[in-house]
Amino acid sequence: MGLDAGRPTPVQTYPGWRSPRCVRHSPQGRRADTLASVSTSTISPSEAPPAPPVRFETSPPAYHHWQFSVEGPIARLGMNVQEDKGLRPGYQLKLNSYDLSVDIELVDAIQRLRFEHPGVRVLLVESAVARIFCAGANIHMLGSSTHNFKVNFCKFTNETRLYLEAMAAECGIRTVAALSGTCAGGGYELALACDEIVLQDDGNTAVSLPEVPLLGVLPGTGGLTRLVDKRMVRRDRADVFCTVAEGIKGRRAEDWNLVDSTVPSSRFKTWLEERLATLAEAKGPRGRDASAQGVPIRPLGGVYKDSGITHRFVTCTLEDRVANVVLRGPTTAPPTDGATARKDANDLWAWRAARELDDVLLDLRFNRLEVGTIVLKTEGDPDQVLAWDRWMAEQSEQDWFVYEVLCAWRRVLKRFDLTAKSAFALIEPGSCFVGTLFELAVACDRAYMLDDPDQSVHVQLGPLNDGAYPMSNGLTRLQTRFLGEPDTLAAALAHDGPWDPAEAEAAGVVTISPDDIDWEDEVRIAIEERASLSPDALTGMEANLRFAGPETMETKIFGRLSAWQNWIFQRPNAVGELGALTLYGRPERPVFDWRRT
Amino acid sequence: MGSVDLNALIPNNVDLKEDRRLQRALEAWQPQFLDWWREMGPEGFQADEVYLRTAVDVGRDGWAHFDYVKMPDYRWGIFMSPAEDGRVVPCGDHFGDAAWQKVPGEYRNALRRIIVTQADTEPASVEQQRLLGQTAPSQYDLRNLFQVNVEEGRHLWAMVYLLHTHFGRDGREEAEDLLRRRSGNQDSPRILGTFNEPVEDWLSFFMFTTFTDRDGKFQLLALAESGFDPLSRTTRFMLTEEAHHMFVGETGVGRIIERSAQVMNELGTDEPDRIRAHGAIDLPTIQRWLNRWYSSSINLFGGEQSSNAASYFATGLKGRYKEDSYEDHIALEGVYRMQVPQNLGLTTEEVPLRNAMNEILRDGYIGDCEFVIARWNRILEKAGRPERMELPNRRFNREMGIYSSYAYDPEGNPITAEAFEARRDDWLPSEADSVFVKSLMKPCLEFGKVAGWIAPPRKGINGNAFEWEYVRFDKSSAGIACGATPSLTGE
């Protein structure tokens, strides 16, 4: 349905939320017009919104669900989910089942390992609860969540599992999942994200993906993908495994490569400690060793309001369904080396800006559902940004901390790619879309560059644009952008120095560079038009257009697996009155519509 | 249904002779079973002739055929209760449909799990009790122990028959695993917790057969209501045998209580130390054993609110105890009001009936146990004693279910974990209690004699007297059989 000026459009409202309204938007941030009427129709009670906003910062002393300890080169994460400490009331996190609050702590622990504990060589993921490893995502939480929340939850947990794998690859921290007791669904998916899975062969401990037979949905946290793509389990065996609710244990689990080792109970603890000790001997990359001093992660101290978020380098101002995100570049030159950088690490532009942007993206995803478009701007001195990029490129070769900062950008850029909001970069005078920040412009669905003869504006590549920030598909954003134009890509990479607006458009690195006369209308119309399109269709369209090129495990997880899961999550066979997910744990049995789609 | 074929290697009424495939499967399994029996069955006594009951038919006379037999020669047979014409699925969403003679594909895994879990308890209890023969208080009790053991072995056969017949290769593998797991073994324990606890003394054995076998009875009663007809018919026949096991337990504890009352009256005291000094077991100690085994057994019914239980009922795999006494076999209406922990206290919660099926079965069990306690108390009453045995509350000392994270006293009142620990030795067997009870466990196998801590039974087995040769000891083997240790005698 198109949006005609002045015509009332019914818009669903979320009780307790700001009224979402369709707006006329101007590039200066003024609201040109507002549609007169807002429908009072509300969504069904079962889709009641999550009450307080979700915040993503935490720290080990505040953990409810994980026992986190580091001893020399060995770190341990013991899952110990507190039933009544879920994100919101209405469900109990029984049997080490998890909700978002459990994952927020997990991702925090991963960050702490990367930054605060460079001496760690191996991470053990285990359960602190007897007879159960983890029962997966809490069904009652899923059952009582809105569709939006479910999708965002799954995306976040998928990102977290990938962060575990990225940590192993980038920091050389080997991850071992030790399974003693039930390991079902999301529990097994967590184990699948580890490098090694060891199963206690006690006759009871089994791994299972019971989603299909029990719940009528998919193991949506990468389970199906990792089974066949990472562990390369034969598809017929995987097929059997995914339909046996009770799962597979002992020898067969090892024979089928569902786990790496099975160890009898009597030797389990000893075996595990020996294995950890062996893995802990490995040398860490870039000086990650016992002598390395960690860098504490301090709270960002952002100011959160209904109207947006204020961080030091990133601000987000909401105007109805548009988020105006401004990222400010560095005001100082980069430190001389990694050691200097570590001294005031929490004030370090490169690290802090990445963390702040990540926080804003998560806030937009979970707390600002009605925001459909991110309008991204930068402010600052392009030369400084490039200086920092050069510093990161050089130092990250040998300095573990600087490499961590670079990896933080890698993650936030991927999170940007995977955020289900339209994103437009506005490249205006005073902006600094160069190097790492230019990468953000390429990550946007479109980039508009003002061609103003009176004011200089340019974009430029830096040393990090050609490989430091791979997308989920394994390619750089420029490779993905110029998938069918290798010459254009080569020319862009060979171009030494800045592009002015006309050159940038000709080089294909921006979408369009309107002149100062057209600029305001061009941008306004683009944003207004965007705001009028179906949010579902846009999400699907963007997810398809953003990831050209080869499939990887990651793209399959966020594409194939998530899309099918999100479809199933909407289907009556799962969530209808008689659907399997709806009725799970209830006395009635599901009734299916047998027609295949 | 075929007639009983006594000549077959395996006595049965399931037409085994005509079923070559099944016969081969079972004939292959049988040597493994005998190996298991030799390794994990009763320690010693394998060459002795024991006066045992063997099922040779399902009719009134056939199921209780008594004769002397060496245990390894015992004929473990396969019997099902006769088929009922026109039997229907007795409960759940398929209520009223013709009962299934073959496993419905969609319920295969769930059914297999139910059968394996039940089957696993049968060899487990044999393993748990394997050393008890060494300390039997009389020939009569020794014989009863072995009767229980061989019949648990037969129940294993019954379950293995179902696995072999209806579950293909998975079933055969599960049947082999049943012989591979070992009670209390850290590396391959039995599936359920209670069946990994050692039964090291006869007081425990009698409590086990009273309370744990009674759980078995109720599970079998629920499975007898299964829509899967072969399971229903198999378990119905098992129930006839199970009754004897509970008889052994209940009368065993009763005889210990009787002896204690007798000693208390003789000495004119109820002081535990003096009762103990006289070689009997004081009532508080018996109560602690009762508390331990009852609270352990009651876990076996599973979670108070269970989606598995709801699913088993809904699919008609498992019904309620006496399903036909209910009017509504669908059980989608109505709720079960249950006490659930809240803020260190209790509150009443309404649970959909189907999700409360475990608790409904547990209620039946508890009611049954209360009758047992009443009969034990009648012994005390008859002896003129004021003391009474008591059944602890279902919340007491739980290791599974909604109460397991909290502490309750035997009356079921919520208390702190510290308060529980402070009273633990008053409520549950202490190390010192075990040492004392074990000190009494000396064999007393001379003809007509009985140990001093237990009264003789009123009558013997199969119309015979207590003073009767229940075990013909193999004279050639130097056993502990005939009074290797001087035995206390109560008479």
Image (cartoon, grey):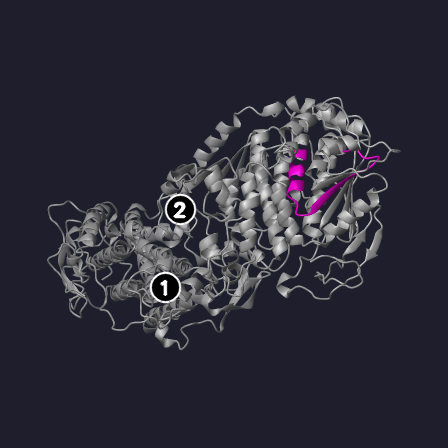
What chain is tagged by disc 1? B
Quarter of the image for residue B208 reads bottom left
Q: Distance between the residues labelled 1 and 2?
A: 22 Å
The chain under label 2 reads: A
* Residue at the spot of label 1: B317
Q: Picture coordinates of residue A451 (x, y %)?
A: 82, 36
Q: In which quarter of the image is residue A74?
A: top right
Q: At numbered mark 2, what does the secondary structure look like: helix, strand or loop?
A: strand
Q: Nearer the viewer, residue A146 or A505?
A: A505
Q: Which amino acid does label 1 sit on?
A: Leu
Q: Marks 1 and 2: CB-CB under 8 Å? A: no
Q: What stretch is highlighted in magenta?
A: A409-433
Q: Which is more toward the observer, B288 or B64?
A: B64
Asked if the magenta segment contains residue A255, the reply would be no
In the rendered image, which residue does mark 2 sit on? Answer: A248
Q: Is residue A264 visible?
A: no
